[in-house]
Image: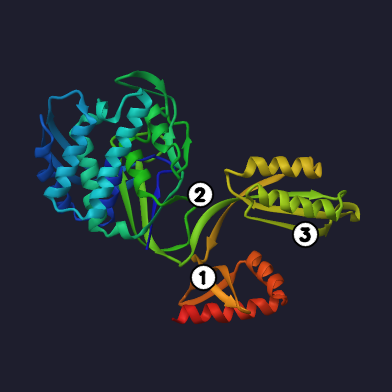
Amino acid sequence: MVLVIDPQIAGISGDMLLCSLVDLGADKDKIISGIRKSEKFFSNSSIKKIDFEKTQKHGIDSICLVLEINENVHERKGSEIKNAISKSAQEINLSPKATSFAESCIDTLISSESKIHGVPEESVHFHEASSIDTLVDIVGITIALEDLGLFDEKIVCLPIAVGGGSVTFSHGTMSNPASAILEIFKNSNLEIKGNDANEELTTPTGACILVNLADESVKHYPQLKLESIGYGAGQKDFETFSNVLKIVRGTGNNFEMDSVKILETNVDDISGEILGNLIEKIMEKGAKDVSIYHGITKKGRPTNLVSVICTDDTVDEIIDSLILETGTLGIRISDSNRFIVPRTKHDVSINLNGQSFKVHYKKSSFKGKTDFKIEFDDLKKISNIVDKSIKETDVLLRKEIEKLEIN
């Protein structure tokens, strides 16, 4: 199963995610009961009313959180909030995996504030996040995720809308996204994007939950058979879009998925030796693959199409190499999602011709069938030592690996 979180338009907040999980099928009575048991750990705060109701946002049926509280507190230590969440997890018998998730969410929030203000984590105080809303969001979402069995599923996230304009809070006014949002997403595997909404669309609580929940970022919906959809409404209303978080659950295939950059350029005035050297240099820069294709362009001119697969973190260096080594005047860049057959890396010691060799290989599995491929560098090295062809060496090593796999 795969869960897709889609915050591309309206961003994400804690209550939006909680409501979308309820709409997806999480037991709202279990959630409310768990939150009610937890509120006693939040001093000077109480919940007068909590419920989930149907609403419409720009014609989209969705679930919204109805929350009325009594609260007389304007700031609270981060350690106090974490303590309340830990005690809540114990009180409502959350699993170790769920408890770890809930604690990680508040840890992320505390850590971001610590870095922004340059104070130790134990000294962090919250203002906006000091409300019992934070407990409701984190505890409620954790209960919902566990109820739906989502901790054992693959969770991916589309680019996250953060809005635009400015935001005003306890520390004054600053451009949006605010420092807390940037700090939370920094070094995560998720992507953010601004838009023309003159509002904060992604809250710190929503952000810290998301970075601890999603396995990876994707640019497009993965291939999957849809089973259920959840719509969680935010509190604000906007004229041009529905303030709704959409999550989709479905059955995916057995592939892993990632996003890559495709770099392409045509060169027609360099030698084969330079092209061979180019491949080596680009692979050293971290490219996943390089291909060169011969072709004919306008006016019958022969050309070589250089195609490179790489990731965002290596694209700049590879572009530099392409320009400096080939003199090309332009490079086409496109994004592409890849489906990858699951594989694992292994290494074994194998005796061949009376000598012991360390052999590395990758093992793949798809639809009940498995296969493996020995690393070429190992094949080359061993074939030279035992004075056999690479093909013959591959056959001999595969036989030995197959024996080990059976045993």
Q: In which quarter of the image is residue 210?
A: top left
For label 1, the residue is: 348
Give the position of the N terminus as an image quadrant. Answer: bottom left
The residue shown at (30%, 45%) is 17
The residue shown at (18%, 33%) is 80
Q: How crowded is mark 2: few (under 14 residues within 10 Å), some or many (20 or more)?
A: some
Are dots 1 and 3 in contact, CB under 8 Å?
A: no
**Residue at disc 1, secondary structure:** strand
> Is residue 246 rendered to the left or right of residue 393?
left
Say above or below: 100 vs 389. Answer: above
Q: How far apart are marks 1 and 3 (CA)?
A: 37 Å
The residue shown at (69%, 42%) is 319
At which x and y percent is residue 374? 59, 70
Residue type indicated by callout 3: Tyr
* Marked residue nearer the N-terminal end (1 or 2): 2
Q: How far apart are marks 2 and 3 (CA)?
A: 28 Å
Say above or below: 129 vs 207. Answer: above
Mark closer to the observer (2, 3) = 3
Q: Distance between the residues labelled 1 and 2?
A: 38 Å
* Marked residue nearer the N-terminal end (1 or 3): 3
Q: Is residue 236 visible?
A: no
Residue type indicated by callout 1: Val
The circle drawn on residue 219 is: 2
For label 3, the residue is: 293
Mark closer to the observer (1, 3) = 1
